[in-house]
Image: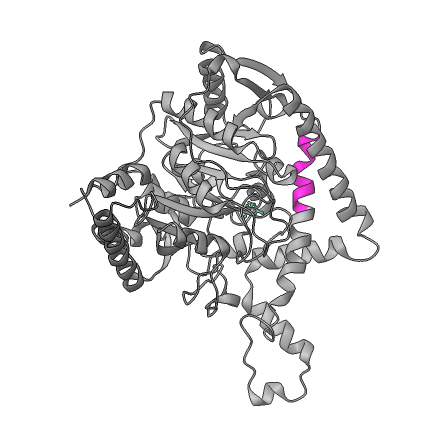
Amino acid sequence: MISALGTATALSNLLAQGATTSLELVTTYLDRIRSLNPSFNAIVCCDEGRAVEQARAADQLRMEANKRGESVPPWLGIPIILKDIICTRGVPTTCGSRSLSRFIPPYDATVVQKLASAGLIPLAKSNLDEFAMGGSTETSIFGSTRNPWDTGRTAGGSSGGSAAAVAANFAPVALGTDTGGSIRQPASFCGICGLKPTYGRVSRYGLIAFASSLDQIGPMAHTVEDLAMLLSIISGHDPRDSTSIDQPEVSARLAVPSCPQEIRVGIVREHLDHQGLHPETRSAVEAAMDVFRTAGAQIVSISLPHARYSIPAYYIIAPSEASSNLSRYDGVRFGHRASLTQTETIGSSLIDMYCRTRSEGFGAEVKRRIMLGTYALSSGYYDAYYLQALKVRRKIREDYDRAFEQVDVLLGPTTPGPAFLLGEKLNDPVQMYLEDLFTVGANLGGLPAISIPYRTTSEGLPLGLQFQAAPMQEERLLQIAHWFHQLVDYRPKTI
Ligand code: GLN
């Protein structure tokens, strides 16, 4: 029996040595999901038959290639978990919403095709906040995901299912999506690594849209090394996504150790001095600064004067785009449709059908966003809200451009504090939105940002650190985060 606690890189080495098979890995992980998922509710759908069949095919391919002395893709036969907002052909893709509870995509997202060409095996789909709107994975029709470190707490969101699944070792790696922090915040809460790539780095074809100018798919894993490899597999230009950047894939190689004396690390004053920052999170950031300082890196104090407007700007732009994107779920073209009895149908209009359909199909948070967004985009308010938010967004990006003239990365907290209790913020949307204080900037600026686990609090909860870099600088970002992560004596949860 193979230890299911390996990183994907370690497991791929075992596969290459013939010390395990893909079938053994897949069955081990499926057993874990079967026995442990009821405690965490991280997985919403599992196609066991297909995964086993693909594992057998991967083992066969490897055996034949070995006989011929040919090489195989390095991650051939490695299992992966996908957030249930990424389209998978023939496998339900629900977005955690009643409106899509019966949607079975007829096609695969580009990332899913890329994973398949690299030989990875999708094991399961993971839980999320409805349409990825939220920070706690509590608004899903499947119920809340629980944090493997403390099941009374949230795993974060909206990619809470993917984060909890990696933390609980249901697979070595997963994909999440990040519109305002949904990869980094759950990664931080669950003690794993997560990366939001530069906007346009990874194709959004087949990713069900929440806020199209902000959404990005990204990797979640135990190590920065695995993030880099997974990013190299899923990145690259895609003609089917008009916002995809025409650049080759990111390199997976982190081998060149960065010389710490050459690293310039910026500390954002507005973040470190923020009153909402948990004292243990602040001291973790300060301790990380010391690690860099001791290694000879240059520490620079940076001001992002418009950072304080990032939450208000985000919560105008994201709901505006969401209200437009979600208009397609009208029960006619897409999504759940209300069934009216014959008596109800008599005298009712098309509008009645739309109202009933959308009232039943969406939960409270999604409705709140649709209303906010429709308001911000409506004539008479458009200039005051939406256009103004776009101007603020430009200022935020300019702040970052100035910062990255002086430093390679910005170091700071991922979240204001550790994982909060289930239910704690569910009925207080503003408190929930404030969770995104330190993450939405990277989405508004389109830049890459990573969260890596660093410490545990006195209560034993994981705390993440965030590194951000200039657009397209993933390789440098990963290299610095990798260098740092290797120095940190941090142990993943064993379950
Ligand atoms: N918490 C943020 C929101 O609710 C971010 C969500 C996300 O990144 N998908 O909008």
Picture coordinates of residue 195 (x, y %)? Answer: 48, 38
Residue at the location (53% across, 40% down)?
Answer: 197
Judged from this view, the residue extending furthest toward the right is 380
Reply above or below: 436 against 262.
Answer: below
Would residue 144 be seen by someone viewing this image from the given angle? no
Judged from this view, the residue extending furthest toward the left is 1
Would residue 229 be seen by someone viewing this image from the given angle? yes
In which image quadrant can residue 152 be found? top left
Picture coordinates of residue 440 (x, y %)? Answer: 60, 39
For the N terminus, the quadrant is top left
In which image quadrant can residue 3 be found? top left
Picture coordinates of residue 350 (x, y %)? Answer: 67, 80
Q: Is 363 one of the magenta-colored residues? A: no
**Number of marks drawn:** 0
Picture coordinates of residue 149 (x, y %)? Answer: 34, 38
Query: What span is colored magenta in the figure?
Result: 306-315
Q: Which of 74 and 176 is in front in this view?
A: 74
Q: Nearer the viewer, residue 426 or 197?
A: 197
Residue at the location (62% across, 39% down)?
Answer: 446
In the image: residue 173, left or right of residue 359: left
For the C terminus, the quadrant is top left
Reply above or below: 397 against 154.
Answer: above
Reply above or below: 34 against 249.
Answer: below
Q: Nearer the viewer, residue 403 or 253?
A: 253
Judged from this view, the residue extending furthest toward the front is 68
- Secondary structure mostly taken by the magenta-highlighted segment of the chain: helix
